[in-house]
Image (cartoon, rainbow, N blue to C red):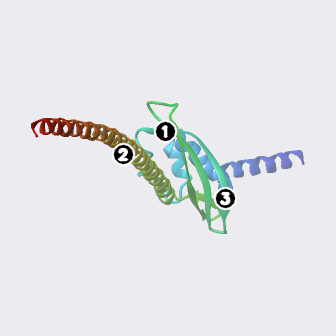
Amino acid sequence: MKKGIWFFIWMVLLLTGCTEHNFSVKDTTEMFWKTVMENDFQKAKELTVYKNIDGFSLPDDMQIVSYKVGDIIEDDTNAKAETTLKLSEKDDKNKTEDIVFNTILLKIGEHWRVDAEKTLQNFYDEMAKKSAKEITNTIFSAFMNGISNVKEIEKAFKEGFKQMNEQMQKALEQMQKELEKVKKEENVTKGTKI
């Protein structure tokens, strides 16, 4: 009897070891990003819908430092898992940035699989948005600095005009005094002649 029970347990273990596990959306997403982070694209391929991730790549100068799976929205056949990848430059590990996007999964039979094409599209969309925002901020900052410089130039012109106006006023006053002096001298010379 004991042999029969052990045989049954052994068969169950053998059969469960030979079949795929029914991982949750979160488990599948985490396993996928772990394998991508480790550059094990063969394992990552097994977690995708079409078993094809040949075009799946990050920018050449970037690498994944860590990943985190956040909120998940799922129904019977589709799922979105909010994913945060912390990326660093290959040359400078201290320079990192977080990209938040959705990993897209489909349920194939009883198993969740990553739609690598849609997921990569989401990733690149977020990268583009982040880059566009950084460019916009840089342009805005340069513009504001330019405005600041324009205001400083305007202030310098106003100050210059004020000084120039004061100098001209002094010069006019000096000319006025000189003219009055000349008139007095003229009147004196005219008065002695008469």
> What numbered label is drawn on residue 72?
3
Q: Is residue 79 left or right of residue 125?
A: right
Q: Nearer the viewer, residue 63 or 23?
A: 63
Q: Nearer the viewer, residue 48 or 63?
A: 63
Which residue lies at the image location 45% right of the left edge and 39% below the top edge?
62
Q: Which residue does the numbered mark 2 point to in the structure image?
A: 154
Residue 190 in the image: x percent, y percent? 12, 39
Mark 3 against mark 2, which lies toward the viewer? 2
How far is the residue under mark 3 from the one under mark 2? 55 Å
Tell me the element at label 3.
strand
Q: Is residue 128 left or right of residue 43?
A: left
Point out the tag, 3 or 1, that comes first from the N-terminus: 1
Is residue 56 visible to us here? Answer: no
Residue 17 in the image: x percent, y percent? 68, 48
Q: At label 1, which amino acid type do we have?
A: Gln
Q: At label 3, which amino acid type do we have?
A: Ile
Tell me the element at label 1.
strand
